[in-house]
Structure formats: structure tokens, C-alpha cells
Image (cartoon, helix red, strand yellow):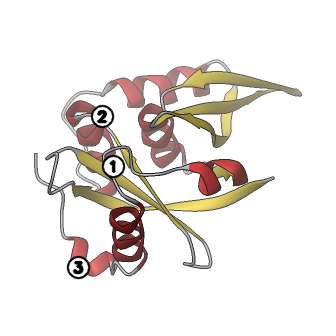
């Protein structure tokens, strides 16, 4: 089963100084942090801040190509996590055919933002995901509690 999640924002990991995209379920009960690269964070941030660029970025190009070929991004699924690496599928509907395309979660989320496609996370990913750099369960629990208590207004704007 998959859980519908919302992209709540971006933040910097204070320990690794790497960007984190924060997903939260619709009820606001569960939070999933996904560490991503700087370039991928920029692609997400541009869309979150509604601050387009003068030329299309890769995710804009993908959106335009899918639409030009008669397709629609129907949804994005975060399907698995292995040793801190997340896996995703982008579902594209073309006519009556549903096509699953393998993608990095950061790319899938950037595309979902541009196409307003819903994001789903597999239940086992929510259960199994652990912050990769958290060495103890106490640190994990503290980080999880902190992420769950975040107020979107307190996150501020992501800066590159």
C-alpha cells in the first residue's frame, strides 16, 4: 500500500550540509526526509519558490516532452529504500497505457512539482527509512521528532 505525501519543503542537514527534501503525509502524522544533491535541490527549490528560470531546466524539458507526446504524469511513487538510497517510479499515462519510468526520487519529485502530480510513498519505505547518517536509535528518534514538529513557516526559503 502507498501513502499520499506532500512535499513540505527543503532544508539543510546541519551535520552533513546536504539538502533534505521533506515529505509529510496528508494527516501530518508521518514525515519522510530524503537527502538529495545540491543540483537536484535547486531544481526542487525553483519550483517550490515559484521562481522559474529564463530557460527551461531539465525537469521543465521532461514535462514539455511528455505533454508534447500526448502524455500526462499521473503520479510519482517512492518505491523502495536500500542502505539509505531511495528508489522512485514516475507513472506516465499516454492514451490508455500507463508507463512506469525508473527515476531518482529527487528528479521524480521535481517533475511532480512541475506537473502537480500526486506523490505516494510505499508503506514499507516509511517503516524502513532511517536517516543514513544517524548512528544511534536515540539520534534517529530525536531527528524524527524534530522533522515531525517542523512548521513549514519556520523552514524559510532554501538558499543555494
Mark 3 = which residue? 154
Report how far apart the C-alphas of labels 1 and 3 lie in the structure.
19 Å
Identify the mark at residue 131; answer none if there is no mark: none
**Residue named by callout 2:** 40
Work out whether mark 1 precedes mark 3 in sequence or the reverse, and give the earlier one: 1
- Using the image, tell me which numbered label, if any, was put on residue 47: 1
Q: Earlier in the sequence, mark 3 or mark 2?
A: 2
Compute the Cα span from label 1 to label 2. 11 Å
The answer to whether residue 10 is seen in the rendering is yes
Q: Residue furthest left?
A: 160
Q: Residues within 10 Å of mark 1 (few under 14, many from 20)?
A: some
Q: Position of residue 84 (x, y in %)?
A: 45, 37
Which x, y percent locates residue 52? 25, 44
Residue 113 percent location from the top left of the image: 46, 48
Residue toward you, 11 or 60: 11
Residue 119 picture location, percent across and down: 60, 51
Q: State whether residue 115 is above or below residue 87.
A: below
Q: Residues within 10 Å of mark 2 (few under 14, many from 20)?
A: some
Of badges 1 and 3, the one in the foreground is 3
In front here: 83 or 96? 83
Question: Left or right: where does residue 55 sit relative to residue 33?
Answer: left
Image height check: is 83 above or below 32?
Answer: above
Q: Secondary structure at mark 1?
A: helix
As drawn, the residue found furthest toward the right would be 96
Amino acid at each position: 500500500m502507498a501513502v499520499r505525501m506532500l512535499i513540505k519543503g527543503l532544508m539543510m542537514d546541519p551535520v552533513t550540509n546536504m539538502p533534505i527534501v521533506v515529505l509529510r503525509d496528508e494527516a501530518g502524522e508521518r514525515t519522510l526526509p530524503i537527502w538529495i544533491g545540491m543540483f537536484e535541490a535547486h531544481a526542487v527549490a525553483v519550483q517550490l519558490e515559484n521562481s522559474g528560470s529564463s530557460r527551461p531546466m531539465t525537469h521543465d524539458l521532461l514535462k514539455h516532452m511528455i505533454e508534447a507526446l500526448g502524455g500526462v504524469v499521473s503520479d510519482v511513487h517512492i518505491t523502495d529504500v536500500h542502505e539509505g538510497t531511495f528508489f522512485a517510479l514516475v507513472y506516465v499515462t499516454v492514451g490508455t497505457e500507463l508507463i512506469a519510468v525508473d527515476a531518482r526520487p529527487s528528479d521524480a519529485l521535481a517533475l511532480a512539482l512541475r506537473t502537480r502530480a500526486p506523490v505516494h510513498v510505499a508503506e514499507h519505505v516509511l517503516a524502513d527509512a532511517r536517516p543514513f547518517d544517524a548512528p544511534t536509535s536515540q539520534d534517529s528518534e530525536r531527528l524524527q521528532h524534530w522533522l515531525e514538529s517542523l512548521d513549514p513557516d519556520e523552514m524559510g526559503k532554501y538558499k543555494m
